[in-house]
Amino acid sequence: MNILDENILSEQRQLLRMRRITSRQIGDDTGRKGMPFEVLQRDRI
């Protein structure tokens, strides 16, 4: 699974989905916007 930064555009995320590449986006699918990467690693989404 790929974790996408909160600044990735929805069009870019859609391209990944069309290619069947699984991903989660910070703020939309997991965590919250502005969350430090270290917290994501610690919590292991």
Image (cartoon, rainbow, N blue to C red):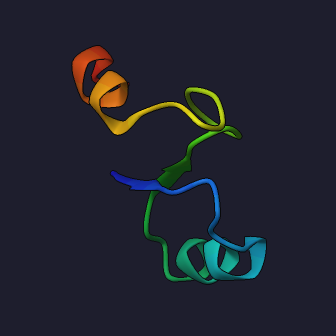
Residue depicted at x 25% and y 29%: 41
Locate residue 39 relative to residue 30 in the image: left or right: left
Locate residue 13 relative to residue 44 in the image: left or right: right
User: Could you tell me how many numbered marks the image carries?
Assistant: 0
Q: Quadrant of residue 38?
A: top left
Residue 36, x across and y down, in percent: 42, 33
Q: Where 16 sits versus 23, above or below?
A: below
Locate residue 3 relative to residue 6 in the image: left or right: left
| 1, 10: nearer the viewer | 10
Residue 23, x across and y down, in percent: 47, 55
Residue depicted at x 52% and y 57%: 5
Q: Where 13 sits versus 42, above or below?
A: below
Q: Where 2 sits versus 21, above or below?
A: above
Residue 4, x across and y down, in percent: 49, 58
Residue depicted at x 45% and y 58%: 22
Q: Quadrant of residue 11?
A: bottom right
Residue 3, x across and y down, in percent: 41, 51
Residue depicted at x 23% and y 18%: 42
Assign the C terminus to one quadrant of the image: top left
Furthest-right residue in this view? 10
| 24, 22: nearer the viewer | 24
